[in-house]
Image (tube, helix red, strand yellow):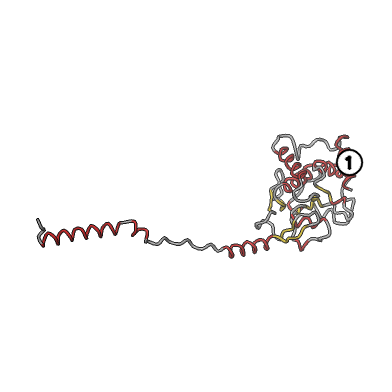
Amino acid sequence: MSLSRRAALKHATVVAAGTAVVTWTGPQAIAATPSPSPDPVDISGALRRHKAEQERVYTGKPSKNGWEMEKVADGGGTIWTRPLPGTALGGVQVRLGDVETALVHVIRRFHYEIDELRRDDLIGWRRPGDVRKGLAESNQASGTAVQIRPGFYPSGQRGGFFANQVVVIRDILADCEGVVRWGGDDPKPDEALFYIDVKPGNEQLTQVANKFRAWTATPGVGAGASADPFQPKRRQTAERLARRQS
């Protein structure tokens, strides 16, 4: 039986409507919607900022002992103010890591066994423009040296310490097993100066620093609790090192 004109029109309208719904919700319509594009990464700008930051901090030039000098301390490089446990000192600006551990041990033993230090008695990092590049004092610009009471022991002069104090200094250096040198042994003496005497990456420096860390973590051992530096065996060890470093 054939459909009436009205029924045929009604049927066509329903089919058309259903087709429209399917077409609107179909995957083709969804896929046609464009996805937002991610913002482009400004690689060149990031590289410029990184280079500017590096130039602000680093010199690209070594101090006398081979460590790179830095233009700032506490400013994004490797040189920061570090605490000195057991002292009233506010801290000292030195290179982080093994260098810090070794030099802090030296300072603390000096404080405990030679003379009590006050806030203005200690100088760590100095600006590269403030040190003489050909001398060991340039190591301060790389954060690998400290001066203890430079006003008491001026550069170029010897004999600022009493004999018993020198024995203690020698014993402190023996603790450091040769990775720290006393400026009093240099051809142009600087008896206030103590500095790292090995190149970056030296394994012995790491071993000595680990030893000091273990001492610090052990009650009754380390700075402030050392064995008698006047014991014959300790003096012999210290004197052998002194001959090697002279």
Q: Is 4 on the left-hand or right-hand side of 19?
A: left
Which part of the image, by quadrant, shows the N terminus? bottom left
Q: Quadrant of residue 221?
A: top right
Q: Residue furthest front?
A: 1
**Which sits in the foreground, 89 or 132?**
132
Q: Is residue 22 above or below residue 162?
A: below
**Which sits in the foreground, 34 or 26?**
26
Q: Is residue 217 above or below residue 17?
A: above
Q: Quadrant of residue 171?
A: top right
Q: Position of residue 193 (x, y in %)?
A: 81, 52
Q: Position of residue 79 (x, y in %)?
A: 70, 54
Q: Which residue is pictured at 69% across the width and 37% down the height?
A: 217
Q: Residue type at mark 1?
A: Arg
Q: Residues within 10 Å of mark 1 (few under 14, many from 20)?
A: few
Q: Position of residue 74 (x, y in %)?
A: 67, 56
Q: Is 79 on the left-hand or right-hand side of 164?
A: left
Q: Is 17 on the left-hand or right-hand side of 53?
A: left
Q: Position of residue 195 (x, y in %)?
A: 79, 51
Report the residue marked by disc 1.
Answer: 240
